[in-house]
Image: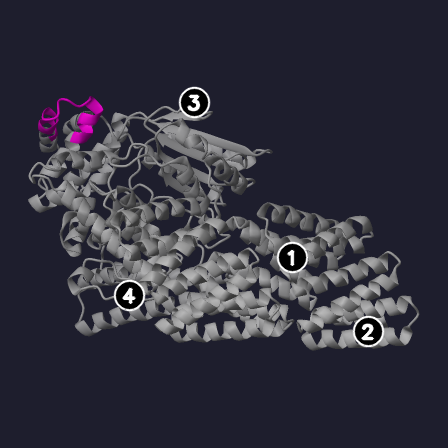
Amino acid sequence: MVPASSDDVWRAARQGFGRVLRSLRVEANLKQGSVSAAISASDSALSDLERGVGARPPRRDVVRHYVDHCLGAIAADEAVLRERRRAVWVAFAQLEALHEQLGDIAGPEHAPPGGAPSTLRRDVHAFTGRVDELALLVETAEQVDTASHRVIAVHAVDGMPGVGKTAFAVHAAHLLADRFPDGQVFLDLHGHSPGRAPVDPRDALASLLAALGVNPLDLPEGVEARAELWRKVLSGKRVLLVLDNAADHAQVEALLPGEGRCLVLVTSRRRLVELDVVSIDLAPLSADEAERMFQDLAARPVSEPRALGELVRLCGRLPLALAILAARFRNRKALSVARLVEELTDAGNRLPALRSGDRAVAAAFDLSYRDLPPRRQRFFRLLGLHPGEGIERFAAAAVCGIDPDEAEAHLDALHHEHLVDEILLGRFRMHDLIAEYARALVGLDDPDPTAAALASLLDFYEQAAGIAGDLLARGSRDDETDTGAASRLPRFADAAQAMDWTDEERANLLICLDWAEEPERVVGFALALAPYLRRTGPWDLVLRVHHRAVGAARALGVPEVEGRTLLELGKTEFYADNYERAQVVLRGAVKIFTELGDHSRVARALMSLGQTWMQTGDYSDAEEAYSQALAAHEQAGDVRGVAAVLVELGTLHYYQDEYAEAVDTNNRALRIYEELGDHPGQATALKGLTHAFLFSDDYERAHDAATKAQLLFRDLRMRLGEAQVLSLLGSIDVARGRFAEARDSLEAAVRAYDGLGDRAGVAMAMIELGIALRHLGEFPRAEETLRAALALYEELGEPAGKAAVRRELAELLTASGKLPGALALLDEAEALYQKLDDRYGKAATSSAYGAWHLASGDPGAARSRYAEALRLARDIAGPAEEASALAGMARVARALGEHEAADRAFREAVAIHRRIGSGKAAGLAAEAGLE
């Protein structure tokens, strides 16, 4: 994690840059609202820009538009203006350099693992009224604050369409955010969104868990299991949760916390009487509130009180209609309120079939729509076909068949008319009612544009996802996009930008995949999304995607396409721990690619097969697969593929106690990744080197490799890699005898793994934590920790972990005098290590047996076991285990009165510990009386 002091450094720098911008606007004598309108930003976005709110530097294009607009209003010599511009860009460059040094700092827009997430939408400008309802929520929040027990407060906000349910919930959430320091989460459940089904509770839980830092790759499959994990994650936390646009109580029930100090706001058009909630029924605004809201939004004097009263009445006092009409009034200086009343009356008469509330809102839409120029009317109609999870200029251009710059201008204009909302800078959405209205207009002037518009939208998302996917998989594109197409697609400077874009568009991409019907389209989307989905999961969703893709590929009857989809399905089965199914699928891919003579893809499939065999302990099969994959990649000239196989071979080498080979192989991979500029690959190779150095007892180089890997994983925002390296650093401290530092690192690693939902990581870190606690003399807590790890490994069924935790628990019980329980665990561990043919594990277990026999009063049996451990340790060149066996031999000799032999063995063991930098040297020397 970034040190706490870095937060202050970043905040001061970001705020300082904000002051630079604000001083430019003040010098230009411009109001904040006029600048926000000129640069197509919301008022709140501009406020954040000038106040220095944000985890990263502001977008360069936003700064450029801001500076250009302000300088254009300053009457000064060109030389002076150039100096002003230069000063801003120097300050911006300094800010970017600082960010490069520090990484992302927690802020409203982004929170690193362990920080408080906030996914709330922007607060509403000119929010009006609802005083009593807000007071009720403030009172509830105070009760949550002061309650002596854990409280879950759930409020259901209901009311007619257009009454402002979402605006109320978001405004209240911003008002109360500081009372819920563990996070504020907004989730649209799409209960009434046109053109799409309500969000399934299982998918909603995946989104909520991801928002609070749980790795989607490790989510359980079923709704009940995910709901249980959600309640566990929220336990004891103070989180504010906004569940917007709920379809019914069944959609919401599984999403509610089980305990904690949480506040939940649920908005719905329906009354959720089946839930145990406090209902907040939003009525239309009072006449006075409605008039005040219109006046605030109009941003110019309103001097027609009677006409204003009539306008409010015709609007049904609904905020959505008032906001649209106020925008119309604000943007047309010659328009009077009286004339607006006449227009609204005429529009309402054209819509007699609607209920009064719907008619009032639709009449407001109709007025604004009819005032748009023809091309913008067409843009508005087709925009309603978009799935609705936010749209930016490229997607808008695709669905409307226009240039992105024109789309940006249309979005800006519609935003000024309140026909779209800006949910993030440059990202917009339509209110559900406006989208319904727009969809109803499609086809009025064009015969049937829907199919063509949707095909264009699918083309855009498939092609853009393919570009992003290539960057995520390889750091580069396979081919060049033609110039014309490139101008209609987003540009990604690197894999990080590709990841950010795909994160933002994830929901839209998955909806488009659901819409896809043609086999070519299904396969195209699945393969384009595969590199992203491998990083994000969850596996049940990814399996559904790739099973569907395999079916589509078989329908096409193209072997190469079927092989590619089988390869992705096989990888996913492996990541989902379905090893047998993965092997069946991957063998099918190998067969197809072999028949096609596609050596590169044969190699990829073989590498994936090798990974499954390595996990099941079939090391010889894994080694054969890796060797064939390496040869195939070398034959194809695929250096990135060669590096990937080398990392896996390095892992296999240290699994088989071949530490020198593990170091050499990972170093070869690291050199390739460095030449390619592949930072994720470098981090992975460094992690492999850390393992190899640690197991060969080279602690200095292990620490150096781990530190470098940690910095890379942190820069890449790869939370799992960070957690793994944090655990490794704890293991290194254990080996060095720095047990207090190790405890702190390992406790942090357990928390990090737990937050990611990685049970295997938790179990592994718990073993090392148990060792550290034992050496610190905290025997009860050490036993509790190791037994928890034992239970986890029993659930996971991972043989190496099951053996290691049994051995460590046995050593603890032996040291605690609980000999019968220790012997049973040692027998189980030895059987597991024999099956795995793990010589390191066998050596450590033999030493543990020696300690047990010595504690049981049988030095002869102890000597035999220590001698066996010494032989195995020397076979694998493991100095730490060699020193451990020698120390055991010395204790046996001392127990038998063989003092010269004991002294020699002690001296040899101490010398080894000192040579490798082990923390056991001083304690062993003191025990032997050597110092």
Residue 906: which numbered mark, if any? Answer: 2
**Inter-mark Cα distance, 2 to 4:** 61 Å
From this viewpoint, is residue 577 visible?
no
Residue 478: which numbered mark, if any? Answer: 4
- Picture quadrant of residue 444: top left
What residue is shown with label 1?
835
Please state the horizontal and vertical placement of residue 148, each as a whole percent of the image: 60, 34
Q: Earlier in the sequence, mark 2 or mark 4?
A: 4
- Picture quadrant of residue 385: top left
Residue 587: which numbered mark, if any? Answer: none
Q: Please name the amino acid that badge 3 sits on.
A: Glu
**Inter-mark Cα distance, 2 to 1:** 33 Å
Q: Earlier in the sequence, mark 4 or mark 3?
A: 3
Range of magenta residues? 344-362
**Inter-mark Cα distance, 3 to 1:** 56 Å
Residue 666 among those drawn in magenta: no
What residue is shown with label 3?
274
- Picture quadrant of residue 303: top left
Q: Please name the amino acid that badge 2 sits on.
A: Phe
Please state the horizontal and vertical placement of residue 756, each as a whole percent of the image: 50, 50
Residues marked 4 and 3 touching at CB (< 8 Å): no
Q: Earlier in the sequence, mark 4 or mark 1?
A: 4
Please state the horizontal and vertical placement of residue 318, each as a whole percent of the image: 24, 29
Residue 357 among those drawn in magenta: yes
Q: Please name the amino acid that badge 1 sits on.
A: Lys
Compare residues 571 and 463 and report the one nearer the observer. 571
Q: How many marks?
A: 4
Q: Earlier in the sequence, mark 2 or mark 3?
A: 3
Which callout, 2 or 4, points to the residue nearer the camera? 4
